[in-house]
Image: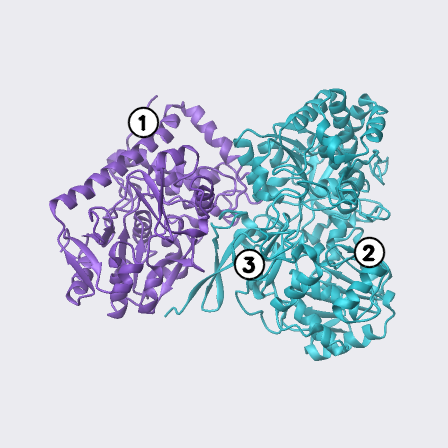
Amino acid sequence: MKGNMYLAWSCDDKIREMGESGGAVTALLKFALEMRLVDAVVAVKKRNGNRYDGVLSLITDPDEVVESAGALHFAPVNVAKEIHKYLDGAKDLKIAVTCKPCDCRAIIELAKRGQINMANVILIGLNCTGTVSPVVAEKMIKDEYHVNPEDVVGEELDNGKLVIILADGARKQRDLEELEKKAYGRRENCRRCAINIPTMADLACGKWGTKDKKATFIEVCSQKGSELIEKAIEAGALIVETPDEEAIEEREKKDKQAVELAQRWEQKDFDFLRRLSNKDRLNYWLEYFNRCIKCFGCRDVCPICYCRDCYLEPERGFVQGGQTPPHLMFPLVRLAHVADSCVNCGQCQDVCPMEIPLTRLYHMLNRELSSMFGYVPGMDLSDYPPLTIVTDEELHIEEVNVFRKN
Amino acid sequence: MITSIEHIPTICPYCGCGCGIYLVVKDGNIVGMEPWKDHPVCEGKNCQKGRNAHTFSTSDQRLKTPLIKKNGVFEETSWKAAFGLIADKFQNAEPDAVGFINSAKCSNEDLYVIQKFIRVVQKTNNMDNASRFCHSTTVPALLSTVGSGVMTTSTTSIEQADCIFVAGSNLQETYPIIARRVIRAKRKGARVIVVDPRITVTVKNLADTYLQIYPATDNALVNGMMRVIIDEGLEDKEFIEKRTQGIHELKNYLMTLDLKEIEKITNISLDVISEAARIYATAKRACILFNSGIAQHAAGIENIKGLADLALLTGNYGKPGTGVNPLRGHANGEGFGDMGPLPVFYPGFQAVNEETARRFEEIWGVKDLPSQPGMTYMDMVEKCKLLYVVGANPMLAAPDTNRVKKAFEEKDLLVVQDIFMTETAEMADIVLPAATAMEKDGTITCLDRRVQRIHKAVQAPGDAKPDWVIFCELAKIMGFEQQFSFDGPVQIFEEIRKCVPQYRGITYERLKSASGIQWPCPTEDHPGTEVMFVEKFPTPDGLGHFQIAEYKPPLEVPDDTYPYIFTNGRVVFHFHTGTMTRRTKGLNNELPNGFAEVNREDARELGIEDGDPVLLKSRRGEIKTVARVTDDIRPGLIFMPWHFSECAPNILTGPTAGPPSKMPEFKFCAVSIEKV
């Protein structure tokens, strides 16, 4: 039932060993495939065993699922967009997808736009407190942990520490805030992200609230999630117990800590911008926009952008072709098109060759709009973006200034 | 029902940055590109060419079968028939009647086999490629000063520089991923000096100090900077003492210079020259980046010797984020040189001479390898009766197109091996269809000496084959089966390792790592070399040698009939002769036509308005295009991109330096312009 909570682990020894926290997620995926509840599992897998090089994989063989076991914090894969682009939005394919909160939210936003068929998708959400860009991670592990990055077999982000685990079981930890002061640590968007438990998914799975038990804390978030987990329990694929009050409190406490850290980052990143006058703030961004080489990377990877005929393409005649930097309308139209629905996944900034902090722009505006309209994108399939449900009355408000007066 | 999705890692086939990309293959077809975030060069960031890297490969205009021209019309034929004709002609030709032009778009394995074929089967060193037009000045200039013409720092360590001197390169458009490193260096406090006669986006976004130089006076500027450094005592005396030779001669020469005269020649005020000199000389680590803006001049060798002198004078060698760094235009821009498909080098930069020829006779198990330098690019175009062109497009890339065209028309046999019916292929008697980088396995070596794997993602269309396969098959027909019995790229690479000392420690197994390996890599447990010349220079005495580089004016200067200076270059949306980018919708739609940038003042005098059709004439030909009136170019200078066959700048260019570089002066010739 929606709202149920479990501590769960796999019945299979091998999966328990390979998987994170008792291998419950791996067991669920394998079960879903074996029972033909889905045609395929979509998960991030290490390529060539390299944990810094995760790629999205389509798994149809139940025995192969275990290869995707274990958390990967250094592989920020664009899950939603790849499902949209390469799996035809799950139009004719039933899939179970493991995803971080931002992936879940991006999938839900694409579904609202008719680009992903949610009837065919089971979202196995994974708790997340952030990912690290792989090249940054490798440098950080070399310089700050004095470890060969290839020797790392696992990592954890917990209690404000980034822990790496080596093949012999040794654990090395560094303070996350210290690392991030040195420009190591998580991606900029992740630092500000306050959505750690993916309750918008069908199942929200994570380590918080498991105390020291080798188990996964699972919160059932939908009827679909409930059906899957109950079948898996019934078939014996998943062994569960009910978490006690203490476990639930621990989970809430950890989440609260992570949210507070995110809020501190948000304040740090945005307050500076919020304090600028409108003119200075515009100039701040213009300087970045002037660098743009019009590679279309931000658009191509954005899970909110989905138009078949993009307004920004030269043949549309709105932004003149062949110019660098492109006309100001290029970044501004992008901003207008995504600001109300940005899920702060960070993909745009990841791919920008000119180091424009795009997520800072989109996410900041989204936060302003969010509080104004009481709308948070990607949380609920039936909750539509403000602009699509604007009322007559709202259309006639005369003075609109998105940013608070200085 | 979907059966498979695969992410195939490979390297972008465009410029020499060497960025990684993922090709997404769905049921045997490339369906998209995804960023490869674990790649050390680009970290998942690509320019628009990288983002569209695979599109040309799937174009329906790909060549799919061998073609033979009969009565002026191409007809499809079989490989067997095409090989028969080629073998017949080439087998009976004198060594000096045949010439081969190759390309740094090919893989190392392709180029190794190609040069081996030419030397073993044809017994000639008549082979050259577009590097003649890019860095034929760089190599002799840097050999004589520091012993090697390679990039000395690595792309990633440009970030560690405190000063970056961008000498005539429009980095942000031509090497965006290098420009990113400059942006990151600036964020850490680096000062950036840009020299360019045009106010490019690089100037606008990256320059702290901008020098709008009079074209082709770079060497005078650099001499002026060195004079200021010496006058102000800013040279690195310890480095000069320990690691160089020839400072007194250089100093004596610099003392004869009149800085007022340099101010006049370069059209840059002495204050600005001095400021640039101080910023460069006082930086802990200063890095020079240059490309064709410096190299494509008759005085390119002097320009580059001057830059090397400047770096030696200030101790800017041997540390990350220093050096004099030539940027390479092609994806395999470093590797092609390493493989030796050049008139003066066997593989591994081993100079063509008796001793080298004997060494390779032993390695390859053959006799009579050529020991005399072969002909260079334009000499072959003009003199060889039989010409075989692989992946090059001289009809757009070579100077004085009308002359090239006439030479092609007079060939006994012109064979062109390419992926598309290029302007050059149109002229051919036989056209052979080749595979693209997405259709073969192999290695390429990008500008910072990084050897990386390219991976086959899909089958080549129709009968198209990898270049190395074509040459192996031809060699067999011509009686050299034993030397060309390679069963695949791994076997070729194993032979490369034997001949190229810099590659000895590199294996396909080791190249599985995303970072590739930077040569020199002498042994299998050697990690590769990020920074060159740390302890000594690869010169006979291990020292850097100051060279006196005197300013020389360009070969053809403006006069009353041709009063404007003409130059050309690249834009971010296109690549070289456009064979790939013009067949990529997302790129070509951005800029489907060429243009001529004209200074606003000049335009007013000429009665030309923005968008007007204009006619440009030089002593060699004329072209029509449209004017782009702008304040971003010096008065007296006209700029055009060279990607468009409809208005190809090389119809106008022509004057060419003598040996050793034989570099055409692409960046400077005299033209007239009028509204039509």
Tell which of A284 and B480 is nearer to you.
B480
Relative horizontal placement of residue A116, taking residue B284 as reference (left or right): left
Tell which of A347 and B117 is nearer to you.
B117
Q: CA distance from mark 2 to mark 3?
A: 36 Å
Q: Which chain is purple?
A: A
Residue B658 % position (x, y): 86, 47
Mark 1, Cα crowd under 10 Å, few <14 / some 14-19 / many 20+, is: few
- The residue type indicated by label 3 comes to Arg
The image quarter containing residue A252 is top left
The residue tagged 2 is: B376
- The residue type indicated by label 2 comes to Thr
The residue tagged 1 is: A399
Q: Secondary structure at mark 3?
A: helix
Tell which of B45 and B242 is nearer to you.
B242
Mark 3, Cα crowd under 10 Å, few <14 / some 14-19 / many 20+, is: some
Relative horizontal placement of residue B356, taking residue B160 as reference (left or right): right
Comes first in the chain, label 2 or label 3: 2
Residue A308 % position (x, y): 43, 54
Asked if badge 2 and badge 1 are on a common chain, one would say no
The residue tagged 3 is: B510
